[in-house]
């Protein structure tokens, strides 16, 4: 009987220690998620400060981008309002708005490629550099944050840790990612019709050429591309031109003198 009680006590102590380890793991993962999100939130607030200056600079040179500028301003104000209302915490709604804002900013930076005067503006170049660096830090922080969320949510959903998560109200964290298919599409920019291109521009690839590289597991199809001229030199080789032929000028042959007989006297 005493041995049974000792074994039971050891089992209970072991389960208690395991539960404490699980609880501490949940707390550690939750704090890591919060810390990684705070780093993203700093960059998001920095983007809130950069966007108004960027919009005003673009507005002075690109009046035709009115719709794009209004969309960026609207999303910026909406994201800032959600951040202030939620105390800087991440929510699914804020994550969606932030992703839409990222797409709108990318679209704006691509659209200004059609304005050479704006691209040469010193103020715009500095804003573009700072905003691009901010977007890169947001992307890196998002990857780190989502990795921590994945590990934490795996613990919340796995057995037996999910039992402890339900007891102490450890809920799943929210990913900072794109869920709308329309936001995954690359921005489309049209700076002119294809018929307006100069004749010296490289021709568009054919359907066979596009199909040759569309499948990652498929081998390339060299026959889909135009074959080279067999008489042309190989890449990296040069053909030696034939030496010029020199023909000396032909001298005129001297004509023999003509002799005329004197007329006979009557």
Image: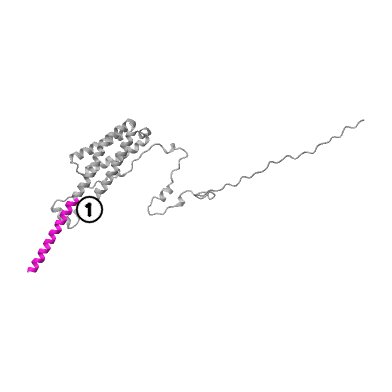
Q: Looking at the figure, which quarter contains the N terminus?
A: bottom left
Seen at 11% across and 61% down, the residue is 13
Tell me the residue at 28%/46% (across/down). 140
Depth order, front residue of 10/225: 10
Residue 170 coordinates in the image, percent (x, y): 16, 51
Q: Residue at x 32, y 30 (%)?
A: 60
Q: Residue furthest right?
A: 266
Where's residue 249, x and y in %?
Answer: 68, 41
The magenta-colored residue range is: 1-29
Q: Could you classify mark 1 by the number of other residues whose Cα lies within 10 Å: few (under 14), some (14-19), or many (20 or more)?
A: few
Residue 114 falls inside the magenta stretch: no
Task: Give 156 or 25, whichever is nearer the viewer.
Answer: 25
Left or right: 193 in relation to 53: right
Coordinates of residue 146 in the picture (x, y in percent): 24, 49
Image quarter of residue 135: top left
Q: Which residue is mark 1?
A: 151
Q: Main secondary structure of the magenta part?
A: helix
Q: Quadrant of the C terminus?
A: top right
Is residue 13 inside the magenta stretch?
yes
Taking 135 as reference, is 81 left or right? left
């Amino acid at each position: 009987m005493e041995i049974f009680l000792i074994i039971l006590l050891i089992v209970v102590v072991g389960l208690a220690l395991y539960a404490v380890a699980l609880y501490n793991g949940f707390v550690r993962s939750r704090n890591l998620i919060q810390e990684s999100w705070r780093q993203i939130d700093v960059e998001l607030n920095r983007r809130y400060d950069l966007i108004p200056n960027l919009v005003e600079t673009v507005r002075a040179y690109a009046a035709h981008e009115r719709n794009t500028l209004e969309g960026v301003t609207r999303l910026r104000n909406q994201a800032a309002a959600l951040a202030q209302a939620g105390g800087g915490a991440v929510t699914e709604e804020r994550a969606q708005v932030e992703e839409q804002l990222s797409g709108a900013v990318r679209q704006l930076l691509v659209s200004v490629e059609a304005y050479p005067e704006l691209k040469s503006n010193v103020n715009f170049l500095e804003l573009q550099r700072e905003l691009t660096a901010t977007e890169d830090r947001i992307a890196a922080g998002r990857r780190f944050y989502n990795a921590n969320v994945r590990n934490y949510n795996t613990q919340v959903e796995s057995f037996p840790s999910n039992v402890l998560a339900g007891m102490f109200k450890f809920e799943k964290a929210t990913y900072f990612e794109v869920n709308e298919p329309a936001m995954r599409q690359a921005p489309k920019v049209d700076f002119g019709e294809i018929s307006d291109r100069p004749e010296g521009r490289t021709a568009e690839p054919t359907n066979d050429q596009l199909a040759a590289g569309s499948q990652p597991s498929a081998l390339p199809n060299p026959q889909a591309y135009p074959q080279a001229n067999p008489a042309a030199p190989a890449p990296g080789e040069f053909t030696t031109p034939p030496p010029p032929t020199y023909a000396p000028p032909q001298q005129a042959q001297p004509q023999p003198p003509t002799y005329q007989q004197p007329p006979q006297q009557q």
